[in-house]
Amino acid sequence: MPSHTLTLVLAAKRGTGLDPLTLHRPKAAVPFGGKFRVIDFTLANCLHSGLRQVLVLTQYKSHSLHKHLRDGWSIFNPELGDFITPVPAQQREGLNWYGGPGDAIRQNRYLLERSAASEVLVLAGEAIYRMDYAELIRAHRESGAQVTLAVRGRREPGSSVQPLVMADQDSRILGLTAPQADAAAVPPADDALATMGVYCFDKSWLLSVLDQGGEGPDEDLGVDWIAPHLGTALACGYRFGGERGRVTPDRYWCDLASIDAYYQANMGLLRAEPPLDLYQADWNIRTYQGQYPPARTVPGAVSGTEGIFVNSMLAAGTVISGGGVNHCILFTRVGVRDGAIVDASILFDGVVVGEGAHLRTCIIEKDVRIPPKERIGFDRKQDQERFTVSPQGVVVVPKGYRF
């Protein structure tokens, strides 16, 4: 069944809520969980769901994302009609780049027309979750709907400000409303639903919508594309985390809308019972990781004290030499030197923490070298003079920063 589906993964956004992590890469390429990129979760869902024809629509500073797709996701044989292919903006429709998700689809209409697929699955490649898309497609076909969108509880963990959905007891969509900044405007019902950026369209109906559409960016497909056609088309909701589907229903979804949301999503992985279990064997997350030696701890050259880590994730190539790491996520090739202490922090690839330095509640970008005796995360005013500090006090040291 999934072989009759063409999948479009939207991965063109910068994701300004994650600045400065997205100054040099799109949101879909932001590192997550010690070894992954954000897009890996959507692509892993495609892989486990039997989807083998995947187009990734890219634009903003997409080189690192294209490289990651090449190195980690060149796993299908195009001669068999299977592919995961990046599709950068090509100005096929006028002289503009992608103006938004709807415009990105509109500009690649020719890829829909040439496909033999009967459905088009549109996915946001910028959220962290597990989902069996094959069951969504099955529900879409059983309902006879022109479009089916995944929905989740508005008050469930990981929720942010998403368009709201009104549905009847048969899951037919009655209305969609744009997100409201005013919390008082959010319906108080505990069963209020929100969109997830996951849509299954009948291809013929989608093409007719493209024929009727204007030239705007269409920032939300539910509000801008589906809502105006509810009087003439059948739209249904598919409840995320239900009993259908092969994936264990952990019901976790997070769109990483801010630095604080990103930080909390990573730290959640360190709980004794994490809301998202990366070690779940029946739905593993694929990625690319370089051929680095195993992580290890060694005594410090001067102090002779053994390097230690407590309740932390250490990726390959990491060496803790006489330092201490507590409740942290360290990506590949991180070095923590003698006497350094790193607490409740996320260190990207190649970060080196100098002797005697002390970091707390930090995100340190790729290849940054922390000088000996440096202290970050203890004086908010001083940190704000040098770095980005989130509302909840997470300090982000950007890529290329020189002390």
Image (cartoon, rainbow, N blue to C red):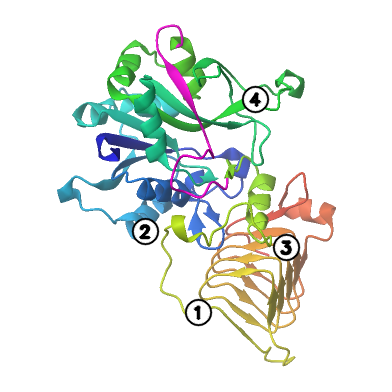
Q: Which residue is mark 4?
A: 192
Task: Indicate which disc residue 72 carries.
Answer: 2
Tell me if 263 is positioned left or right of 4 in this view: right
Sequence-first disc among 3 and 1:
1
Report how far apart the C-alphas of labels 3 and 2 lie in the structure.
29 Å
Sequence-first disc among 1 and 4:
4
Magenta range is 230-250
Of residues 279 and 264, the one nearer the viewer is 279
**What residue type is disc 4 on?**
Ala
- 35 over 234 or under it: above or below: below
Quarter of the image for the N terminus: give it: top left
**What residue type is disc 2 on?**
Gly
Q: Quadrant of residue 3?
A: top left
Could you tell me residue 242's position as x and y percent? 53, 38
Q: Quadrant of residue 395?
A: bottom right
**What residue type is disc 1 on?**
Pro
Of residues 71 and 387, the one nearer the viewer is 71
Kind of element beneath mark 4: loop
Sequence-first disc among 2 and 4:
2
Report how far apart the C-alphas of labels 1 and 2 lie in the structure.
20 Å
Q: Which residue is mark 3?
A: 344
Characterize the magenta stretch by its predominant secondary structure.
loop
Kind of element beneath mark 1: loop
User: Residue at point 36% right, 36% down?
Assistant: 8
Report how far apart the C-alphas of labels 3 and 4 lie in the structure.
34 Å
Q: Which residue is mark 1?
A: 294
